[in-house]
Image (cartoon, rainbow, N blue to C red):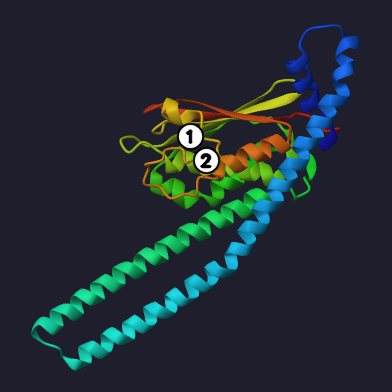
Amino acid sequence: MSEQCDRKSWEELREKILGLGERSTRKSYYPELRRRLDELRSKNAELESILYVTSHDLKSPLVNLKGFGEELKDNCERYHEILEELQLEGEQAEEAAQLRENVELSLHYIDASVQKIDMLLNGLLRLSRLGKVELVWQQIEPKDIVNDILESMRYQLREAGAQIHVEDLPSCWGDAEQVNHVFSNLIDNALKYCHPERKAEIEIAGENCGAECLYRVSDNGVGISEKNRERVFEIFHRLIPDHASRGEGLGLSIVKRIMQRHGGKVWVESEEGAGSTFYLTFPAYGP
């Protein structure tokens, strides 16, 4: 199946580049196109390898930083206990109190930064591993996958007061685990970026379009501005940069990578303040 997806991408690229002209003339370009595609695949594999090694190697010093940070926090607590036992008065007591406040604030920032770096590295590792994991191609039922996701997110959905509508979804061909990741990310984003002035509404629908199946995940959330709409699938770019929700800005990059490996597409239509709709295409049939 992966060879078919590669062949499909190559054929599409060939038609876009060559467009017009006799078939016999176009065939003369095949070797050059094949060479360039092989070169692109090689560069992509090299980048994924660098990404994986870098992310993995940075985890060890981060663990040390986190561990010694916790140790420093415990030592500071003991230090403050000793100061309290001394029963300082006047200016000394005020200075000790100020010192404690400054230390606690500094440790808080250190811990927050460590958590942020850890989250980013975990995201990068997930992204780098996507190209290494062999896809398990099979016929899957997206509606069953979506129902499992909603069941696992029952608490978040209840807290948000979200209304979910899932239509009949046609079966498609793909890797069940990675398809689960795609829908999980899109549903999570719909909850994360719900509009503060109205209850969240999420609709998941799909249709069979012959050789492929088209799915959409729609919400009535805050939407995406036009300037950010073009960049939502870029690495480290969050849907709404200034939004209070936490995230490493890798979720949609991973979604796009999964869709590419499936020979499918993902895109978004959105209106700021009115909501967003993400579209996905998966192969309808196997080899």
Where's residue 186, x and y in %? 54, 39
Of labels 2 and 1, earlier in sequence is 2
Front-lying residue, 237 or 204: 237
Mark 2 and 1 residues: CB-CB less than 8 Å, in contact? yes
Instruction: Give the number of the mark in front: 2 or 1.
Output: 2
Image point (79%, 31%), residue name: 37
Look at mark 1 in the image and give the residue it sits on: 202
Asked if residue 70 lies left or right of residue 29, the reply is: left
Image point (25%, 76%), residue name: 100
- Residue 171 in view, yes or no: yes
Label 2: state its secondary structure: helix
Asked if residue 68 lies left or right of residue 98, the reply is: right
Image point (16%, 91%), residue name: 87
Residue 21 sits in which quadrant?
top right
Separation of residues labelled 2 and 1 (CA atoms) = 8 Å
Image point (37%, 84%), residue name: 75
The numbered mark at residue 183 is none
Find the residue positioned furthest to the bottom: 86
- Residue 5 in view, yes or no: no
Relative height, residue 16 to residue 58 (above, below): above
Q: Quadrant of the C terminus?
A: top right
The numbered mark at residue 187 is 2
Where's residue 124, x and y in %? 60, 52
Residue type at the position of mark 1: Ile
Residue 233 sits in which quadrant?
top right
Front-lying residue, 157 or 174: 174
